[in-house]
Image (cartoon, helix red, strand yellow):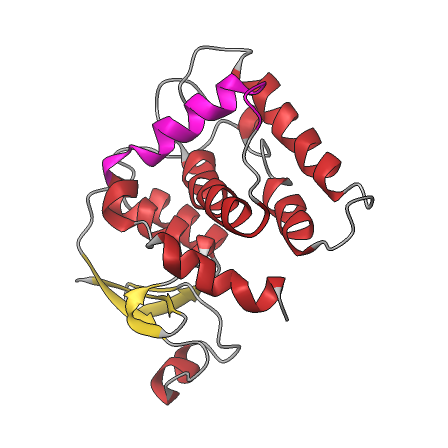
Amino acid sequence: MALEICVKAAVGAPDHFGDCPFSHRAILTLEEKNLTYKMHLINLSDKPQWFLDISPQGKVPVLKIDDKWVADSDVIVDLLDEKYPDPPLKTPPAFASVGSKIFGTFGTFLKSKDSNDQSEQALLHELEALENNLKSHEGPFIAGERVSAVDLSLAPKLYHLEVALGHFKSWSVPSSLPHVHNYMKALFSLDSFEKTKPEEKYVISGWEPKVNP
């Protein structure tokens, strides 16, 4: 039985994969597990009725598995790992929350118009915590040499951070965080990531209305 997944289409380009890191995380999980799936691109500014029937709140991603539609990327990832245990992607509990605040602090800094509001410092604080985690053990990934769910959650978020902060603020991860740089390089060179990443211009068009409302 084929898996189906609804993900965000690009803003202004409904036939291209868009800028939703949660959709991307679910797709990366499917790819890492070598699963066959059918992808539905959903234009979130013009949601089709059939999609609202399966996702009444209009949120993506939504995965069809065992003839049931399941929402929420956390739930989707856990479900896929349970049903298709090979290769295992479960994050060891000690690492489960690594980097969990990066995306929130990135979004605040990206949208900030006040250079004194400490939003840049808050993001740097989270990236330094990631640096310290990565240098505390052999890499290149958060739990060691194998990719796990926490990496597939962070990969799209760090990609957004690199593309959007580079574009809107000419900002990049400081060179004083070499382990973070190497980690991003390792994530972005995964076959699953190279195959599925949204184009940079679609990440930018997705953030544009939030940065310049």
Residue 67 showing in the rendered view: no
Question: Which quadrant holds residue 90?
Answer: top left
Residue extending furthest bottom? 49
Q: Is residue 199 left or right of residue 92?
A: left
Question: Which quadrant holds residue 87?
Answer: top left
User: In this orientation, which residue lies closer to the viewer: 133 or 97?
Assistant: 133
Looking at the image, residue 67 lies above or below residue 26: below
Residue 77 in the image, given as x and y percentages of width and height:
41, 48
Look at 60% across and 34% down and name the residue there. Answer: 97
Q: Main secondary structure of the magenta part?
A: helix
Looking at the image, residue 19 lies above or below residue 105: below
Residue 166 in the image, given as x and y percentages of width and height:
51, 44
Answer whether residue 169 is magenta in the image. no
Quadrant into which the N terminus falls: bottom left
Residue 56 in the image, given as x and y percentages of width and height:
49, 80
Residue extending furthest front? 170
Quadrant into which the C terminus falls: bottom right
User: In this orientation, which residue lies closer to the viewer: 4 or 43?
Assistant: 43
Magenta segment range?
Answer: 174-191
Look at 43% across and 46% down and name the residue there. Answer: 156
Residue 50 in the image, given as x and y percentages of width and height:
34, 85
Looking at the image, residue 4 lies above or below residue 158: below
Look at 78% across and 51% down and name the residue there. Answer: 114
Look at 57% across and 21% down and name the residue there. Answer: 131
Answer whether residue 183 is magenta in the image. yes
